[in-house]
Image: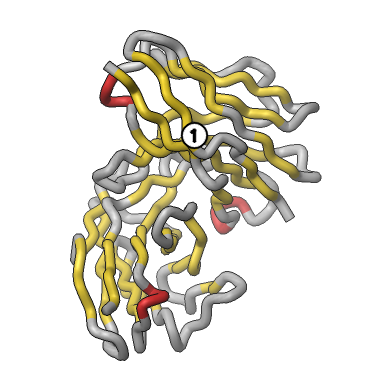
Amino acid sequence: SAVISQKPSRDICQRGTSLTIQCQVDSQVTMMFWYRQQPGQSLTLIATANQGSEATYESGFVIDKFPISRPNLTFSTLTVSNMSPEDSSIYLCSVEGRPNTGELFFGEGSRLTVL
Amino acid sequence: AQTVTQSQPEMSVQEAETVTLSCTYDTSESDYYLFWYKQPPSRQMILVIRQEAYKQQNATENRFSVNFQKAAKSFSLKISDSQLGDAAMYFCAYRSAELGGATNKLIFGTGTLLAVQP
């Protein structure tokens, strides 16, 4: 399985600031997915990032709030902009697993707390 | 739209005993994958087991097995010989295998928190 590293692991942020989360994969992958997990909740897909094209956002998520970059096949960033306490969550990066299995593998997640 | 339901917010099992976590889902598709993921306090999502909808045989991975009932849209996870390290949040998830393939999203249930008592 791919090894996925996320930075930062955790951070405490002030309201109104922005933070960029990095996701590095040890192999080339076509699709990368960003999920949000609010406290005590399940995971919700924010967007799908394909290298060389604009990310595709899910309903309820917009590019101005969660801009995503995908400069190459092993790296992606998610920015949480103009943060409010409601953005306090774990943000997880994921990539496809073995071909034709439907599997996704996840990074360790980035826990953001917004004060 | 597809949905995944886990009706047991919390479960508890004695060490070495067996526990079954329930999951039901709703879909009109015929080709899909089902998964169980484990999320320990470290927060990393770990894939426990996978089932392809076209396979009638239930998947098994060591102490973990599933009971897949396609007609009933049920996908339960059985953990045998429970260990302290099995304590975690368990999420059931669905992913379409139909056209759209790799862009199809993983849809999660709300999770079941499993406690293992020594």
Q: Circle 1: is it few (<14), some (14-19), or many (20+) Cα within 10 Å?
A: many
Q: Which residue is mark 1?
A: B36
| Residue A32 can be seen in this image | no
Residue A94 horizontal/vertical position (percent): 39, 54
Rendered view: A84 above or below B62:
below
Quarter of the view holding residue A11: bottom left
State the count of labels.
1
Say left or right for B52 vs B40.
right
Q: For residue A98, what is the image quadrant?
A: top left
Quadrant including the N terminus of chain B: bottom right
| Mark 1 element type | strand
- Which quadrant of the view contains residue B6? top right
Which chain contains the residue that carries disc 1? B
User: What percent of the width, then of the height, locates residue B76?
Assistant: 59, 25
Is residue A77 toward the left or the right of residue A63 in the image? left
Q: Which residue does the image show at 42% across and 59% down from the upper left? A: A37
Location of residue A98 with respect to A85 vertically, above or below: above
> Can the viewer see residue B48?
yes
Q: Quadrant of the C terminus of chain B?
A: top left
Q: Nearer the viewer, residue A58 or A11?
A: A11
Residue A90: x and y, percent? 34, 61
Instruction: Please tell me whether residue B38 is drawn above or below residue A34 in the rendered image.
Output: above
